[in-house]
Image (spheres, helix red, strand yellow):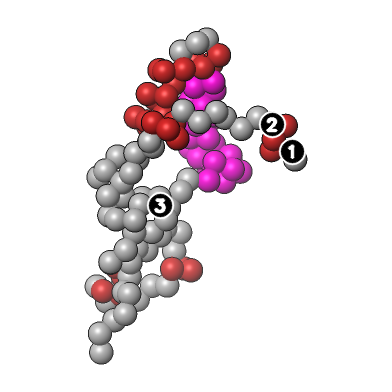
Amino acid sequence: MALVRPRLTEFHGIDVAQANVDFAIPFLEEDLPLYVDPFLLWKSPSLQDQSLHGAMIAAFNRLGMLSQRGQTELAVQIIQQMSECEEVGLGGAATKKGKRISLAVAQEPPLRAECLAA
C-alpha cells in the first residue's frame, strides 16, 4: 500500500512521531511553513537562543535608526537582502523555492505602537 503524503521519516522507515521530536519533520512533496518566533527565543532558558533574540532586536533597531536618519533606501535594501533566498524554501513559499521580500512590501511603513494597542 502506497503512503499518502509521506513525511521524510515514514518514507525511510524511521518510526518516530512529530510530537516526540523537537524539530519539524517535512513532507516529501510539499513545503512546510516554518517561521522563527522571537518571543520563544527570548523566553528560552538557552543563552544562545536569548542571544539570537538580542541580535534580532538589534538588527531591527538598526533599520529604524537608518530610517530616522534619512537612509530609508539603505534600510529597504537591507530588508530585501535579509529575506529568504531562493535556495532555502521556508515560510510561505508555494514552491520549493524561497521568495524574497518585494520592494513594495519592504517600503511599507512600520506599524506604530498606538495601532497595535487598538
Q: Amino acid at mark 3?
A: Gly
Look at the picture and state if 78 lies above or below 100. Answer: above
* Residue occupying the point 46% across, 68% down: 20
Q: Which residues are magenta?
A: 37-64
Q: Amino acid at mark 1?
A: Ala
Quadrant in the picture for the C terminus: top right
* Residue occupying the point 45% across, 35% down: 105
Q: Is residue 46 magenta?
A: yes
* Residue occupying the point 59% across, 43% down: 39
The part of the image, by quadrant, that contains residue 45 is: top right
The part of the image, by quadrant, that contains residue 41 is: top right
**Where residue 11 is drawn, which disc sits there?**
none
Q: Is residue 6 magenta?
A: no
Q: Residues within 10 Å of mark 1 (few under 14, many from 20)?
A: few
Q: Residues within 10 Å of mark 2 (few under 14, many from 20)?
A: few
Toward the bottom, the furthest residue is 1
Look at the picture and state if 104 lies above or below 61. Answer: below
Disc 3 designates what residue?
A: 92
Disc 1 designates what residue?
A: 117
Disc 2 designates what residue?
A: 113
Quadrant in the picture for the N terminus: bottom left
Q: Position of residue 69 (x, y in %)?
A: 52, 10
Look at the picture and state if 104 lies above or below 92. Answer: above
Which type of secondary structure does the marked residue at label 1 adopt? helix
